[in-house]
Image (tube, helix red, strand yellow):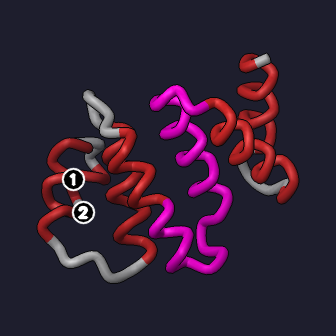
Amino acid sequence: RSAYLEKNYAAAVLFFKKLPPTTASHHFYLGVAALKQENPDFALAETQLLQARSLGQGWQEDAINWHLALAYLGQKRNAEAQEELGNIISVDRDNVAKAKLLLEKMK
């Protein structure tokens, strides 16, 4: 966890992978670390964030949607990214301005 807080995302990915994933937060932080490391693992990020969404039942919904959109963009899957950005805008919590800006840039 300290590696994540220190923004050493590659070390955080290795650490989180060693632990048995049981909670939405574990999957979330592993997904975000996979996305933010120097060489992003977009597929790992997607898998973990989808699992966090499944387990979280609304927990960190906006943050999960935002990071999923970035993971999809990294995989050149624009339609899925646009769907996640649309979810952020429709819920109207955090990241709305960033989601609108990114959607505009994608047009």
Range drawn in magenta? 50-77
Which labelled disc corresponds to residue 12?
1
Residue 12, position in %: x, y? 21, 53
- Callout 1 amino acid: Ala
Residue 80, position in %: x, y? 65, 42
The residue depicted at 19 percent of the width and 42 percent of the height is 10
Badge 1: how crowded within 10 Å, few (<14), some, or many (20+)?
many
- Callout 2 amino acid: Arg
Q: For mark 2, what is the residue? A: 1
The residue depicted at 43 percent of the width and 62 percent of the height is 28
**Which quadrant holds residue 91?**
bottom right
Q: Is residue 89 left or right of residue 49?
A: right
Magenta stretch encompasses residue 88? no
- Relative vertical location of residue 13 with respect to residue 57 in this rendering, above or below: above
Q: Nearer the viewer, residue 5 or 15?
A: 15
- Relative vertical location of residue 91 with respect to residue 103 in this rendering, above or below: below
- Relative vertical location of residue 76 with respect to residue 8 in this rendering, above or below: above
Residue 21, position in %: x, y? 28, 76
- Image quarter of the N terminus: bottom left
The residue depicted at 60 percent of the width and 41 percent of the height is 69
Q: Nearer the viewer, residue 87 or 3?
A: 87
Return the disc, 1 or 2, that comes first in the chain's sequence: 2
